[in-house]
Amino acid sequence: MNIIGKDIPRKDAELKVTGRAKYIDDLTFPNMLYVKVLRSRFPHAMIKDIDISRTKNNKGIVTILTYKDIPGVNVVPVVLMDQPLLAEKEVRYIGEPIALIAGEDKEATEDASHEIKVEYEELKPIFDPVLAMKRNSPKIYGKDNVFSHHRIRRGNIKRGFNECDIIIEHRYTTSYQEHAYIETQGMIAVPYEETMVIYGSMQCPFYVQDAVSKILGLPYNRVEVIQTATGGAFGGKEDVPSLVASQAALIAFKTRRPAKLIYSREEDIESMSKRHPAVIHYKSGVTRDGHLNAVEVKYILNAGAYSTLSPIVLWRGTVHAVGPYKCPNVKVDSYATATNTVPCGAFRGFGTPQITFAVESQMDELANKLNMDPIEFRLKNILRKGDRTVTGHLIKDSMELEKTLKKAAQIGWKIKKEESKDYIKRGIGVACNYYGVGLGAGGKHLSKAGAMVSVLGDGSVNFAVGTTEMGQGMETVLSQVAASELGIKYEKVSIVLTDTTRVPDSGPTVASRATVMSGNALIKACKPIKKSITDIAAKMLGCAPSKVKLANGFAGFEKKRINLDDVVSECFKEKRIMSAQGWYKAPYTSWNKATGQGKPYFIYSTGTNIAKVEVNLLTGEVLVKKIVAVHDVGRVINPQTAAGQVEGGVLQGVGYALFEEMDSRDGKIQNTNFSTYILPTSKDSPQIVSVFVEDPYPEGPFGAKGLGEQPLIGVAPAITNAIFNATGIRVRDLPATPEKIILELDSRQGKF
Ligand code: MOS
C-alpha cells in the first residue's frame, strides 16, 4: 500500500488532544526567573529618563535591564536592521519595549512594571500610511517614511487604457488582522555552561539564533534554539519570536539563571505583528470582448514603526497585484510606509490577501459591466500553461487554475431564487487566486533546506528537518514522505524537535514552503540509507538490488517477502550507512527591480473559491452559508490534513471578510482581547466543500506544491462579490460589517 495520497492520522493528534504535548508554558527549570517587558505608553516620544533606582530593590525583583545592558548590538535583525531590541532615546509605537524586569515570581515583576517611572517628551506622531508619504508629515524613516517600494512595468499603460472599452477605478482598504494563535508568544532562555539554550514557540529557529547571537554577542555555535510544540503561528511567529527570545536571553545571560517570558494576550495583541492594513488604488480596463488589457495599481501598506518583514510582504503583494490573469499592459507601484503604530508583518498570504481583495472585486465589477458571467469572464483571462504572468514568467509546469474554476462552478455556481425571503437576500460570488510557493526571488539566499534521517537498529526511524510543525500538519506529511521513500511503516517513523544543533539553517517555515523544501531534502537524505537497505535486502532475497521492492515494512522480490526490521538489523551487522543528511536548494528565480519582470517564484499553487451568502436587509448581517474551495496544489500527500488547511484558511478568510476589525485610535489598539476583537466561531462556519484537482509538479516531493496560505487568500472577495450579487452593494472596505451594509442600504432606501 502506498501511503502517499492517503488519509493517514496526524502524528501529533493524540499528544495534543490529551494535553500531553509540551508547550513552552508547560516547561519550568530549576531556579527560573520570570520576565516582564516594560513598554512605551506613547506612540512617539523621546525618553528623557528611566528611574529604576527604587524599584530594583523591591522584594522579589532580581534585575531590571535597559538597552545599556546589551552586550552585543541593540538590533532585531530582519531585513533593514532599523529596530532596536530595547528603545534607546526614542519610542515609536505604543507597546515598544523599553526595559526588562526579572523577578522570582510573576506578581513581583508585574508590580514593578507599574512602579518604574519613565519620563517622556512627546513628539508629533503620524498614523496614516498615505499621509506619512507627504512632504510635511513627521519623519520617522528616511526622507519620505517609505521603507520599501516595488514596481512592475509591462507594455504601455497609456496605450493599454486607450484600447479599452470599459475602465473602472476604485479605492479599496483592508483592516489589520490579528493572528489569534491559541498560544501567545513565549520563550525560555536557559544558560547551560557556555551555551545559551532557547526553548519556545516559533516558526524559524534560525532567525531566533541569529537575533540572540547578535544581542548577546555570542557566536552561532553558542546559541542553541529548540522549538517546542507550537500552538498556531500563521506568520505571527515568523520574525517576532526573535524579540521575545532575545528579551528572555538577555535576562538569562546577565543573571546566569533560566528566564521565562510568556506574553499575556493583551500585550501580545498590542505589541506583536499583524496583517498590514492596506490602501489600494486599482484601475483596470477591458475590451468589449472581455479581455483584460490594462491594469494600474498603487498599493500602500501601513508597515508600522519599524520595517521588520514589510519589504518582503510588499514584494509578494506586488508580484500578485494582477491576480492569476494575463494582461499585456501593467503598471504597479507599491509602498510600505512608516507610521507610529505597531509593526506589521507576516500573516498567511503575506501581502496577497489585501491585493487579491482588490483584484477580484475589480474582475467581478468588470464582468458585471460587460454583462458577462463572472466565471466566463475569468475563463477568458486566467493563466494557463504556456502563458506569461504579468511579470513575464512563462508558465511551464503544474497550473490547473482552469480546472479549479470549472470544478468550483460545477459544484457551487447556482442559486435557488425561490429560497429568498423578502428581507433575506441570497447571492453567490467567485474569486480566483494564485500563489508563488516558497520564498522566491525576494528571499533567494534563504531558499534552501536540510534534513537528517537515522534508521535505528530496531528498524524505527528518526528524522529532523529545519522547518517547523506549528499545527499545519508538516510532521505528518513529512513522516509519510520518509516512510514511503524508505518503505518503512509510517508508525515507525518519528520527527524530532527542530533544533539548530541538529539540522543546518533551512530558512523560515513560511511561504507554504515546508512540504516542497523539507520534503525534497528528506528524500535526498533517505537515498544513501535506501541504498544500504536495498543492497542487503537483495543479498537476503538472492536477487539484484534493482529488483528489490520496498514498501510498508517489507522488502520483496517476486513472490518472496522479508521483514524490513530483519534487513535493517543485517545492515547494522554489515556496518552500512544508516544515517544521512539531505540538502535541497530551490530552483532558479529572478527579479528585475526596475521593471518588475522576471521569474519571481519557481511554481504557483492556484485555487477558486465560490461563496454562497445570505444578507439580512433588516440587520445588515451577512451569513456565509457555503464556501466551495477548489485548489490545485500539485499532488496531495494527505487529503485529510490538506482539507484541514482549507477549512482553517476558509474560516480565517470569513473572519477577514466580515468580522475582524482592529480599532486603532491614535496608535492605540482598543480591542486587545477576544471579547472585543471578534473572531469567527464554529457557529459562523459555513459549510465548506473542499476539493483538490491534481497535476503533479515534477520538481515537488511526489508531485506536491505548497498549500499553507492558499486557502485564505480568495475567501474575502468571494464573499464580498456574493454580497454584491445578493444586494447590489459593493463593499470596498474590509471587513463587511453589518454597520457598513446598513449604512449602504439606508442610503439607497426604496431600491429593494
Ligand atoms: Mo508566512 S505569512 O509566509 O509566515
Image: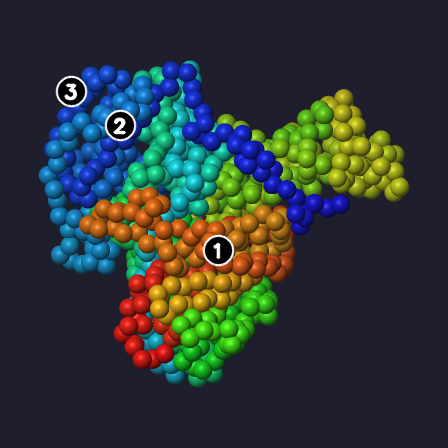
**Residue in front for this viewpoint, 373 or 328:** 373
CA distance for labels 3 and 1: 53 Å
Instruction: Residue under label 2, please give it.
Output: 110
Q: What x and y, as percent, mark residue 191?
A: 40, 19
**Residue in front for this viewpoint, 545 or 241:** 241
Instruction: Residue under label 1, please give it.
Output: 685
SS class, disc 1: loop
Disc 3 packing (10 Å; few <14; some 14–19; many ≥20): few
**Residue in front for this viewpoint, 750 or 59:** 750
Q: Which residue type does callout 3 highlight?
A: Arg
CA distance for labels 2 and 3: 15 Å
Q: What x and y, as percent, mark residue 354?
A: 38, 59
Q: At 29% across and 47% down in the image, what residue appears? A: 671
Q: Is residue 214 left or right of residue 696?
A: left
Instruction: Residue under label 3, please give it.
Output: 54
| 707 vs 94: above or below | below
SS class, disc 3: loop
Mark found first going from the N terminus, 3 or 1: 3
